[in-house]
Amino acid sequence: MNKLLHVTALVSIVFVAGYQNVMAHGGDDHGAATAPAGKAMAYFTSQAISDKYELVLHYEPLEAGEAGKLRLYINEFNTNRPVDGATLQVSSPEADKLAFTVKPTGKGIYELTGTFPDKKAYSLTVNLNAGPGADLLLLPGITVGTELPDRRTATAPATAPWYENTYVLLGGGLLLGMALMFGLMRLRNRRVAVSIAVLLGMLPTANWQRANAHGGEEHGGAAGGATSSTFAIPKETQFLFGILTQRLAAGDQARTTTVAGTVLPSSTGQAVVQSPQVGRLTSLLVRVGQPVSKGQTLAVVEQTIDAATQINLQAERNNLTAELQVARKEYDRLKTIEDIVAKRDLTEAESRLNRAQANLKVFTGITRAGGSSARSITLKAPVGGIVGPFTSAIGSTVNVGETLFTITNLDKVYIEAQVFHKDLAVLGSAKSFGRSDGGTPGVLVEGVNDAGKTGVARLL
């Protein structure tokens, strides 16, 4: 009998412990969902809109018979621009004797001061005259004697049904176990009693749990989440940061494609300036980026001659001088005996003298009158344009064929763009829809280094 009693008690404990009430996001009634706790309202708001103005009225709780202050924000309806210097006449249809004093406190902000006689709802009629024109607007729903609602009020937690209470389940399980034990003790056949006890001990292990998984519940008016694509900006903040608006209007939108390109000069729009001889740069008359005209002097190069060349030049000069002296003496000798000498010999002597004089003159011009070892060469611009970057400086040595300056004429240039295959059709039709500020068909080109500089390119 003691063994049967122990088995029965164990079955009762397992039966009570095995029953579980499992609810997984369902089977409950949330009722009307409340918004999360946040900052309480600081003022009441009333708004009026017309095709010219937008009026927003902010006021704290008003008491009947006491002077109250209201802040009125006035802005243009289309642009949200504050309206300053407006003429206002404020009255109330519910109280004919109610008068307000209007005081500007900021750009587009006016303070209304008045005393409401009774505790009820009022509306204000605003007769407004400002830059956009005269207008009459009605501000409704101005309540007197009403306190601000408190958003931080929390709702009471929902209570579980009485039959799901832990103590009720525990007590009921104990009573059921005692009744079962009493019934088994009255059985005379122990095998039958033990079999019934074992069977009842196995039944609670068959997952007798109540499970509601996301279904069969009523949420009531569920509130949305905290994330939203809309937000509200107080009117005073809009005025402070100068937030302006613009009405949406239907219009045409041209398809645009942006590609990177390289600007190239035209075939006759670029020229290089090189030194024809070895020398030293003695004068530099331009700077990088300077516009120059055709034929303008850019620099002066002074030719430098080494010692061996100077010796050869000196020897050549001596030869030319000696030849000139011989030719002059021969000519003078024949001139004195002109009567007896053949005329042909006198003509040859004169021709030889003239040739020697011409050779010496040419040589003297090359060597600057024969007394200098260098001569200067002036470098001039072959075309008009912009001087490109260069590294030459006064006093530097230049070689034959060395490029000193690059001049580019930007009046007409080519643009070599890197275009993907999918953009070829768009650029091919750019002649029909691509237009500049002046209305010229083409492709609008914007410079990278020159901020704000644009131009129009014509597709070839």
Image (spheres, rainbow, N blue to C red):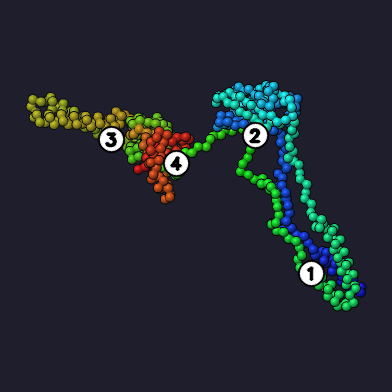
Q: Residues within 10 Å of mark 2 (few under 14, many from 20)?
A: few
- Which amino acid, by three-letter code, is at mark 3? Ala
Mark 3 vs mark 2: give the one in front: 2
Query: Real-space Cα distance between discs 3 and 1?
Result: 135 Å
Residue 134 lies, with reference to residue 147, above or below; the image says above
Return the x and y of residue 120 as percentages of the image width and height. 72, 30
Query: Real-space Cα distance between discs 3 and 2?
Result: 99 Å
Return the x and y of residue 58 as percentages of the image width and height. 67, 30
Mark 3 vs mark 4: give the one in front: 4
Q: Is residue 53 left or right of residue 391?
A: right
Q: Residue at x 63, y 38 (%)?
A: 232
**Quarter occupied by residue 240:** top right
Question: Residue 254 shows which numbered tag?
Answer: 4
Mark 3 secondary-structure assignment: helix
Which residue is tagged 2? 234
**Quarter occupied by residue 316:** top left
Which residue is tagged 3? 315
Return the x and y of residue 178 as percentages of the image width and height. 88, 66
Return the x and y of residue 17 as percentages of the image width and height. 82, 64
